[in-house]
C-alpha cells in the first residue's frame, strides 16, 4: 500500500525566513501529487499539483512555490515567509485517479 | 470556480443521536468523496459516490449523491464519541483536482 512521508510535523519560522517542506511517496509510481493548505478546522485549499517530474501547476498566486525533482518527491518552498503563510500543510498523492492519500501534515507557524 | 459548501459548520450532539451533514454546489461533479480528519492528521477517505442518486452505507454512516450530482449528504445513526472529527466532502471535476468543501466539525459528547 501507499505511504506518504511528510516532515517536519511542526515548524515555527520567523517572518522573512525561507521554507522548505518535503514530501516523499512510497508504494506507487508516477502519482499525481498535491500540496494543500488548511486553516484550523476548515476545508483544504489546493496550492499546487503535479502530474509528473518537473510539471507543476499553481492554483493560487502566492508567496510559495513547488518543485518535483523526482517521481515520488514533492517540495514546497518559499524564499521569504509571510505571516499569512501560517497554516497546516498537507501533501497528497493520487496514484490511480480514484482517491487521495494524505501525509500527516506540517503545522507551520510564522511569527 | 467550483465551490462546495458544507452545513452545518459545527455540530455538537449527545451520544446516540442521529445527524446529517450536507454538501452542496451549483456545479456538477463526476464523483464525490467524503473524508474524515482527526486533529493533527491528514484526511482519510470514507467513501466515493459516482452515480446520481447513489446511496452507500458504511456501518452507521449513510452517504447519498444527489440525482443531479451537485450535492451529497452524510447521515450518521446513533453517533458515538469515536465519530468525532472534521468531515470533508470533495468533488471531482474534469481535471485531476479535487475541490474540497468547507468542512463540518462534529463533536459527539459521551
Image: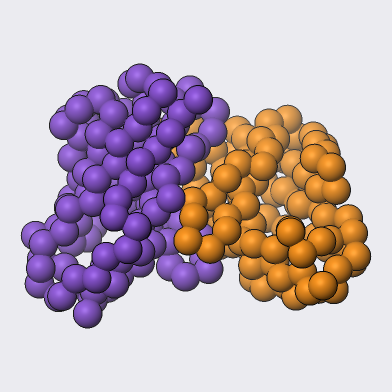
Chain colours: A purple, B orange
Expressed as whole percent of the image width and height from the top left, the position of residue A38 reads 42, 61
Instruction: Pick whichever, B25 or A91, lies toward us.
Output: A91
Left or right placement of residue A103 versus residue A79 in this view: right
Residue at the spot 49% in from the left edge and 37% down from the top edge: A100
Residue A59 at least partly seen: no
Expressed as whole percent of the image width and height from the top left, the position of residue A80 reads 10, 66
Quadrant housing residue B48: top right
**How many numbered tags mark residues here?**
0
Expressed as whole percent of the image width and height from the top left, the position of residue A101 reads 48, 38
Left or right placement of residue A55 versus residue A1 in this view: left
Residue at the spot 62% in from the left edge and 52% down from the top edge: B36
Instruction: Pick whichever, B63 or A111, lies toward us.
Output: A111
Residue at the spot 54% in from the left edge and 28% down from the top edge: A98
Quadrant housing residue A49: top left
Q: Is residue B43 above or below residue A78?
A: above
Outermost residue to the bottom: A111
Q: Is residue B31 above or below residue A71?
A: below
Q: Quadrant where the C terminus of chain A lies?
A: bottom left
Residue A90 at least partly seen: yes
Expressed as whole percent of the image width and height from the top left, the position of residue B97 reads 44, 39
Left or right placement of residue A46 versus residue B102 in this view: left
Quadrant housing residue A85: bottom left
Residue at the spot 47% in from the left edge and 61% down from the top edge: B40
Amino acid at each position: 500500500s501507499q505511504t506518504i512521508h511528510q516532515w517536519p510535523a511542526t515548524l515555527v519560522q520567523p517572518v522573512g525566513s525561507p521554507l522548505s517542506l518535503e514530501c516523499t511517496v512510497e508504494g506507487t509510481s508516477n502519482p499525481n501529487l498535491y500540496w494543500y493548505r488548511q486553516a484550523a478546522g476548515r476545508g483544504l485549499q489546493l496550492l499546487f499539483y503535479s502530474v509528473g517530474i518537473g510539471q507543476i501547476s499553481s492554483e493560487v498566486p502566492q508567496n510559495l512555490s513547488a518543485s518535483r525533482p523526482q517521481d515520488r518527491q514533492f517540495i514546497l518552498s518559499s524564499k521569504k515567509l509571510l505571516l499569512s503563510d501560517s497554516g497546516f500543510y498537507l501533501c497528497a498523492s493520487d496514484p490511480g485517479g480514484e482517491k487521495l492519500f494524505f501525509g500527516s501534515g506540517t503545522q507551520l507557524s510564522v511569527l | 470556480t467550483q465551490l462546495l459548501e458544507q452545513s452545518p459548520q459545527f455540530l455538537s450532539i449527545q451520544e446516540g443521536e442521529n445527524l446529517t451533514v450536507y454538501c452542496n454546489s451549483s456545479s456538477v461533479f463526476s464523483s464525490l468523496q467524503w473524508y474524515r480528519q482527526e486533529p493533527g492528521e491528514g484526511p482519510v477517505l470514507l467513501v466515493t459516490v459516482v452515480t446520481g442518486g447513489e446511496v452507500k452505507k458504511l456501518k452507521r454512516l449513510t452517504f447519498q449523491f444527489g440525482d443531479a450530482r451537485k450535492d451529497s449528504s452524510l447521515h450518521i445513526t446513533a453517533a458515538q464519541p469515536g465519530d468525532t472529527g472534521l468531515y470533508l466532502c470533495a468533488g471531482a471535476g474534469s481535471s485531476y483536482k479535487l475541490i474540497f468543501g468547507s468542512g463540518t466539525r462534529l463533536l459527539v459528547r459521551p
